């Protein structure tokens, strides 16, 4: 599936199937991941019926999000285009670039998300109001 929203893209990690010994997926900073990784976090124990994550954009931060177990829907919005993407393959992720509103929902049971980020946590980088996000997009600001 092509991604239609700006500030996004697909990342595919090398996936090695080792029969009964599992599956190995390899993520390299500044190689498969298009930036230097400064932070990695994961999200689990989600209530598949009611959990909603995200609902924000970043001014500068770049991230790549993966679903390493189960599945979920990633809703992307660049202020002009909107698109829903189902993530369900552990080696396929989506780039969440700056100024991209994103929301995660419709989690399957046992869903685990893994995120690689370009910088440490900084609350001032978050845009948590959708109206503010749209205003900034229209002005071409960050």
Image (spheres, rainbow, N blue to C red):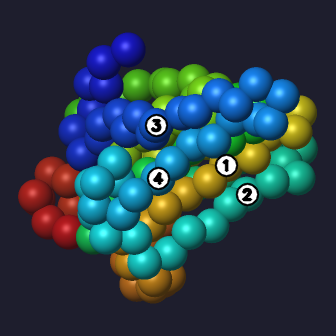
Q: Nearer the viewer, residue 71 or 76?
A: 71
Dot 2 falls on a residue whose secondary structure is strand
Dot 1 falls on a residue whose secondary structure is strand
- Give the percent coordinates (x, y) of residue 69: 75, 37
- Give the percent coordinates (x, y) of residue 110: 87, 39
| Quadrant in which the C terminus is drawn | bottom left
Query: Which is more N-terminal, label 1 or label 2?
Result: 2
Tags 2 and 1 in contact by the CB under 8 Å rule? Answer: yes
- Horizontal side, residue 82 vs residue 102: left or right: left
Query: Which is more N-terminal, label 2 or label 3?
Result: 3
Query: Which is more N-terminal, label 3 or label 1?
Result: 3
Dot 3 falls on a residue whose secondary structure is strand
Residue 43 is marked as 2
Question: Is residue 123 something that shows in the picture?
Answer: yes
Q: Residue at x 49, y 25 (%)?
A: 84
Question: Is residue 67 something that shows in the picture?
Answer: no
- Horizontal side, residue 20 vs residue 1: left or right: right
Residue, disc 3: 14
Q: Nearer the viewer, residue 39 or 109?
A: 39
- Give the percent coordinates (x, y) of residue 108: 81, 30
Q: Residue at x 20, y 53 (%)?
A: 137
- Above or below for 107 versus 52: above
Between circles 1 and 3, the one closer to the viewer is 3
- Give the percent coordinates (x, y) of residue 39: 50, 75
Residue, disc 1: 113
């Amino acid at each position: 599936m092509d991604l239609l929203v700006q500030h996004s893209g697909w990342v595919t990690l090398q996936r090695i199937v080792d029969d009964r010994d599992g599956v190995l997926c390899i993520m390299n900073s500044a190689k498969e991941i298009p930036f230097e990784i400064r932070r990695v976090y994961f999200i689990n124990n989600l209530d598949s019926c009611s959990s909603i994550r995200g609902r924000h954009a970043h001014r500068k931060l770049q991230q790549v999000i993966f679903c390493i177990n189960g599945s979920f829907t990633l809703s992307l919005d660049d202020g002009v285009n909107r698109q829903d993407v189902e993530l369900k393959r552990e080696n396929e992720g989506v780039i969440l670039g700056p100024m991209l509103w994103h929301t995660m929902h419709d989690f399957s049971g046992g869903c685990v998300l893994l995120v690689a980020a370009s910088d440490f946590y900084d609350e001032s980088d978050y845009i948590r109001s959708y109206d503010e996000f749209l205003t900034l997009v229209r002005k071409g600001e960050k």
